[in-house]
Image (spheres, grey):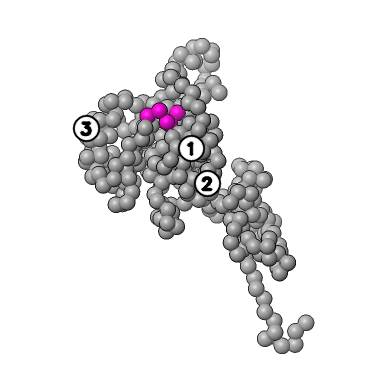
Amino acid sequence: FFTDLAELRLWVAISNPRRNTGAFFECFHKNKDRWHHNYIDSRQVEGVDGAVYQRIADQFGEDHDVTRVEVRGLFPRTGSNQFISREVAQDAATRQIEDDRGAPLLMGVDVARFGDDESVIRWRKGRDARTIPPKRFKGMDTMTLASTVAEFIDSHNPDAVFVDGGGVGGGVVDRLKQLGYRVIEVQSGERADDRDVYANKRAEMWGNLKDWLVSACIDDGKLVTDLTSPEYDITLKGQLRLETKDNMKKRGLASPDDADALALTFAQPVARRDLSLLRRRSGLRQMANMDYDVLG
C-alpha cells in the first residue's frame, strides 16, 4: 500500500509473443523474476468471437506455432513468425529428383516492378523445380520480357503459363495474348479460393507451395533465401496473410522474386498429361485434376 502515488510505478508489457528474441521475450525468460506473467488464450477473452480462433487451431493444430502465437498467446517453438522454415527449404534443395513424366510442365513469370527487382521465369514439373534452370532479368522492359517469355513458351511447350498481372505485369500479359499465346493472368491481391484460410491469392499460392516443398526438389541458393524471407500474420478474420514485398524491403530484405515466380505455378490446378491413361488403368470414374500425385 502506497500513501504517495508518486511512489507507485507500474511497467506493463503486452504483445503477441512472435519471436524468441528481444526485450519482450526476456521478460518471460532471462528477466522473468522481475515480472508477473499472464498468458491469455484468445478463445477465453470476453467479447471476442472464439469461433474465429478455434478455426485457426483446427486448421493448424493446437501446438503449431501459428496457433501458439495467434490463439494461445504463447511463444513460438521456432525463431520467428517465418512462413517457410529454412530446414524445409534446404531439405528440398538437397532432395533427389524423382522423374514424373506424366506431370504437367508449368511456367511461372514474376514481373519486376522496381529497379532493384528482377523479372523471373521459373518451371515446375510435378515435384521437380530444379531440372530446368530459372531465368532472371533485371531492367528489362515489358515488351522485351513478353518476347522473351514467348521464346521460352515456343522452346519448352508448357502445359500452362501463369503470369503476374499486377502493376506493370499487365502489359506483359496483354502483349503475350496479342501475340496469340494462351497465358493465365494472376492477380496476387484478389480473393483466395479458400477464403476461410487465406487472406488473398498470394497467401494461398504460397500456402500450396509450402505444402509442396515437403516432398519436392528445388535448386539451392537464391530460391532458398527467397522462400524463407517472408513472415506472416493472421487477420482479425482468422486468415493467413503473407508479408508484403514493401514490408520486406523496410526490413532490409530483397523482394522474393524467385519464390514468387515458383508460387505462381500453384495459382490453379492443372491436369496431368497422363490423366486419361491413369483413369483407365485405375478404373476410377472420378479423379481430381491434381498436377502431381494423382493417385497419391
Q: Are marks 1 and 3 in contact (CB under 8 Å)?
A: no
- Which residue ends up furthest to the bottom in the rendered image? 4
Q: Are marks 1 and 2 in contact (CB under 8 Å)?
A: no
Closest to the observer: 230 or 31?
31
Identify the residue under disc 1.
209
Residue 281 at what x, y percent from top left? Answer: 51, 11
Does 91 sit above or below residue 188?
Answer: above
Residue 85 at what x, y percent from top left? Answer: 54, 44
Tell me which amino acid carries mark 2: Phe
Does 138 sit above or below residue 131?
Answer: below
The quarter of the picture where the N terminus appears is bottom right
Disc 1/disc 3 C-alpha distance (Å)? 30 Å
The magenta region covers 128-132
| Mark 3 secondary-structure assignment | loop
* Relative to 95, 118 lies left or right: left
| Mark 2 secondary-structure assignment | loop
Q: Crowding at label 1, few (<14), some or many (≥20) Cα neighbours within 10 Å?
A: many
Disc 2/disc 3 C-alpha distance (Å)? 38 Å
Q: Inspect the magenta stretch and tell me whether residue 25 lies in it.
A: no
Q: Is residue 270 visible?
A: no
Q: Is residue 80 visible?
A: yes
The quarter of the picture where the C terminus appears is top right
Identify the residue under disc 3.
179
* Relative to 169, 66 lies left or right: right
Identify the residue under disc 2.
83
Identify the mark nearer the N-term, 1 or 3: 3
Disc 1/disc 2 C-alpha distance (Å)? 11 Å
Tell me which amino acid carries mark 3: Leu
